[in-house]
């Protein structure tokens, strides 16, 4: 029986998480850690050899319902800790989207692969922006609502929201990731912000400020102005903390890294997961993160998005 295999990279959001759900700009980069996913025909739906109940696997359920798929066996191997803020589920969706298209002999147009991956993520989370799935599918740098700073890839529409997606040329940068070891559910954190917004009138001002701040950061990134970008990242972290998506462990790692960095912030949904530091002293940052209870690793940007594997 033919096995169809595809892989996709993890991502790190440099600026704009959460606010992007409400139409504000965001920028993310694909990083050199990948998820490899395979699909093949089967007599029952399985994931890594175990029968699955679709209720608990909404990403797979999305594809199964959309394509009226006969049972398939899915396997997934990842270099990314799950629920770590580095987009393991987006990379899974992107690689699954491509593998299913290979099996069906459908178009492998990158935008279509990304859009399907986004719809699967949206189906699973109930609320999502395209930042994670488009970054995992396209690779490189992806900006949302960046006002033409990058190269236009297209618009994504869902439930009355429209996001303008652009690819952005990203300079060589060293980022240190600090993983707290705390697994955090993206949908719970996205909901937390929604509730915070409903209860606190000033939440919209914070979200607006996150938007303005991110715009400054995207411009600084394209000008390779790491000093401004770093300052904006640290400010972004403080604003996200006010929105209630940071935690003590993340704050400790951010604070400890800032001494040796241009800037540092939580990345992704927050509530645990990971932080990133932009630095030219990666060893010092790794040491500081380790000393404060985190697990550090240095990441590089990759331009290789979702791709077919043999
Ligand atoms: C999660 O990596 C980023 C969020 O903004 C959710 C999303 O955009 O779908 C928290």
Image (cartoon, rainbow, N blue to C red):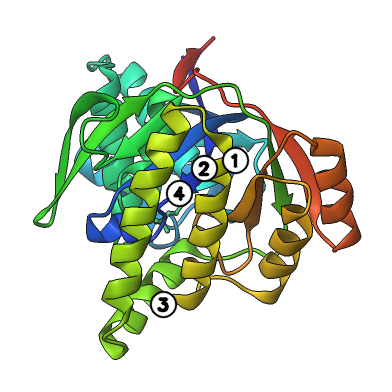
**N-terminal of the two: label 1 or label 4?**
4
Residue 175, by quadrant, is top right
Mark 3–mark 1 distance (CA, rounded to whole Å): 32 Å
Residue appearing at x 27%, y 14% in the figure: 105
Q: Where is residue 87 drawn, in percent x and y?
A: 51, 45
Query: Looking at the image, is 256 positioned above or below residue 298?
Result: below
Secondary element under disc 3, as helix, strand or loop, is: helix
Task: Kindly check if marks 4 and 2 are in contact, taking CB atoms under 8 A apart as contact.
Answer: no
Q: Label 4: how many residues lie within 10 Å, few (<14), some (14-19) or many (20+)?
A: many
Q: Residue 229 carries which label?
A: 2
Task: Write down the residue under mark 4.
Answer: 15
Residue drawn at the location 63% of the way across and 34% of the way down: 77
Q: Name the residue under label 1.
A: 48
Q: Point out the tag, 3 or 4, that comes first from the N-terminus.
A: 4
Residue that badge 3 annotates:
192
Ligand 1 location (quadrant): bottom left
* Front residue of this view, candidates 188 and 244: 244
Quarter containing the C terminus = top right
Residue found farthest to the top? 310
Q: Which residue lies furthest to the left in this view?
A: 160
Q: Using a 10 Å C-alpha cutoff, classify the residue at mark 1 as few (fewer than 14 neighbours), some (14 to 19) or many (20 or more).
A: few
Secondary structure beneath disc 4?
strand
Q: How far apart are marks 3 and 2 (CA)?
A: 27 Å
Q: Badges 3 and 4: C-beta atoms under 8 Å apart?
A: no
């Amino acid at each position: 029986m033919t096995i169809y295999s595809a892989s996709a990279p993890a991502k790190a959001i440099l600026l704009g998480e959460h606010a992007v759900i409400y139409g504000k700009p965001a920028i993310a980069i694909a990083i050199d850690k990948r998820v490899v996913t395979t699909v093949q025909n089967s007599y029952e739906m399985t994931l890594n050899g175990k029968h699955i109940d679709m209720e608990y696997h909404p990403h797979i359920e999305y594809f199964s319902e959309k394509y009226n798929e006969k049972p398939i066996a899915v396997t997934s191997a990842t270099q990314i800790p799950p629920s770590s803020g580095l987009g393991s589920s987006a990379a899974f969706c992107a690689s699954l989207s491509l593998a299913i298209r290979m099996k069906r002999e459908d178009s492998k147009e990158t935008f279509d692969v990304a859009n399907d991956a986004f719809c699967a993520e949206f189906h699973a989370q109930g609320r999502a922006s395209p930042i994670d799935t488009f970054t995992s599918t396209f690779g490189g740098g992806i900006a949302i609502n960046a006002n033409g700073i990058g190269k236009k890839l297209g618009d994504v529409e869902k439930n009355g929201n429209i996001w303008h997606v652009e690819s952005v040329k990203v300079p060589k940068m060293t980022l240190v990731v600090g993983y707290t070891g705390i697994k955090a559910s993206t949908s719970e954190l996205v909901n937390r912000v929604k509730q915070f917004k409903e209860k606190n009138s000033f939440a919209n001002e914070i979200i607006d400020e996150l938007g303005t701040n991110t715009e400054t950061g995207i411009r600084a990134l394209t000008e390779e102005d790491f000093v401004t970008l770093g300052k904006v990242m640290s400010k972004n972290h403080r604003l996200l903390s006010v929105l209630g998506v940071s935690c003590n462990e993340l704050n400790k790692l951010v604070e400890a890294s800032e001494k040796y960095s241009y800037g540092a912030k939580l990345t992704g949904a927050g509530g645990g997961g990971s932080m990133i530091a932009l630095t030219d002293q990666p060893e010092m940052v790794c040491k500081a993160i380790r000393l404060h209870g985190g697990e550090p690793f240095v990441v590089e940007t990759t331009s290789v998005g979702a791709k077919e594997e043999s």
